[in-house]
Image: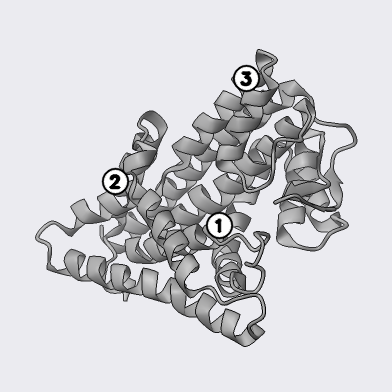
Amino acid sequence: MDAAFHTMPLQTLIILLVSVLSDAVWRWPAAYHPLTLIRYMAETMAAKVRPAKTDPATQHYISGSLGPALLIIPLALLLANLIALAEYPWFFEALIILTLLDFGHDRTHYKHVVKALAGNKKVLARDHAAKFMARDTQRLSDIGVAKASIEALLLRFLILYCGIIFWFVAVGPITALCYRLVIAVSWQWHYKRPGFSLFAKPARLLSKLASLPGALLGIIVVALVTNPFTATAAFWRAPARDLTSRILAAFGAAMGFRVGGPAIYHGIKYRHTRVGGNREVRFSDMTYSYRAILRAMVLLASLTSLLLLILWKTVYV
């Protein structure tokens, strides 16, 4: 569906650069952001269609599959038709990507955490950290808040920023929209919430598969701007074999500190494997990690722009 509405490489490049620059200098107020409405709709839908704990697992899976479909497909079709009928489709494509590429809010929350920790305001730092991660933060130490914030910023960069750019450039804005909405629903219906483990499974599985190419692209870019050989070795030697642990292992090893470990969600402690470097996170690592992700953002935008220019000159010139 989306390929028919995908713009030429030069227009894709312009839309991408405008969206990236806008995300760097402008914040869409969260209260009026369209994704806030999507999260609210997902929460309202879950309250109405999520089966009881005593219902069969298949009923949870069916409800958890139909819910996102009813939320995402009509909106995607509506916007696809709008783009097809518009005289200037590039305008609506740019508006869609500008809406989806909202990584600036996460960077702002992260900087607030850094500022609060620098001022020894532990409670404020925990409150700011809770705004961009699903785990409980009220029992975290200063180092725990710093480590959790670094992990959250990295993962959100890979999943949101890199994932949106990948799907937009590779396929088009409607696919990027569907991807972002799947992520939003999956995170709103977090599988570690009480009563959501089965209901959230379809959305979680789809989000994991859809985020795979963007996350891999992103961690390659992050490795290039930090320590590529150390990161690559840590990625393949990670003791835990899931993608998240491998990504954290690569970043932690490249930066020299240890990440992962126990995390509390809704009062329940989950013991994850510690991966990465040989020492604990320091406060200064928050600044170094932030700068590394900024460098990765610039490199990703540069490489994508170069690819689109090469494609434009090869095919259209």
Q: Which residue is drawn at 19% across and 51% down?
A: 91
Q: In this view, does 170 lie above or below 160?
A: below
Number of residues whose C-alpha sits closer than 10 Å to that of mark 2, classed few (under 14), some (14–19) or many (20 or more): some
Q: Is mark 3 on a helix, strand or loop?
A: helix
Q: Earlier in the sequence, mark 3 or mark 2?
A: 2
Residue sitting at 64 percent across and 37 percent down? 225
Q: Nearer the viewer, mark 1 or mark 2?
A: 1
Res 309 visible: no
Q: Is mark 2 on a helix, strand or loop?
A: helix
Q: Which of the marked residues, 1 or 2, is nearer the chain's N terminus?
A: 2
Name which residue lies at 78% across and 47% down.
263
**45 relative position to 93: left or right:** right
Which of 167/275 is in front?
Answer: 275
Looking at the image, which is closer to me, 164 or 9? Answer: 164
User: In the rendering, at what x and y percent does residue 73 appear?
Assistant: 35, 74
In the image: residue 47, left or right of residue 156: left
Residue type, mark 1 in image: Trp
- Corner quadrant of residue 283: top right
On residue 50, the disc is none
Disc 1 or 3, which lies upstream in sequence? 3
Q: From what the image shows, is residue 166 above or below residue 279?
A: below
Amino acid tagged 2: Ile
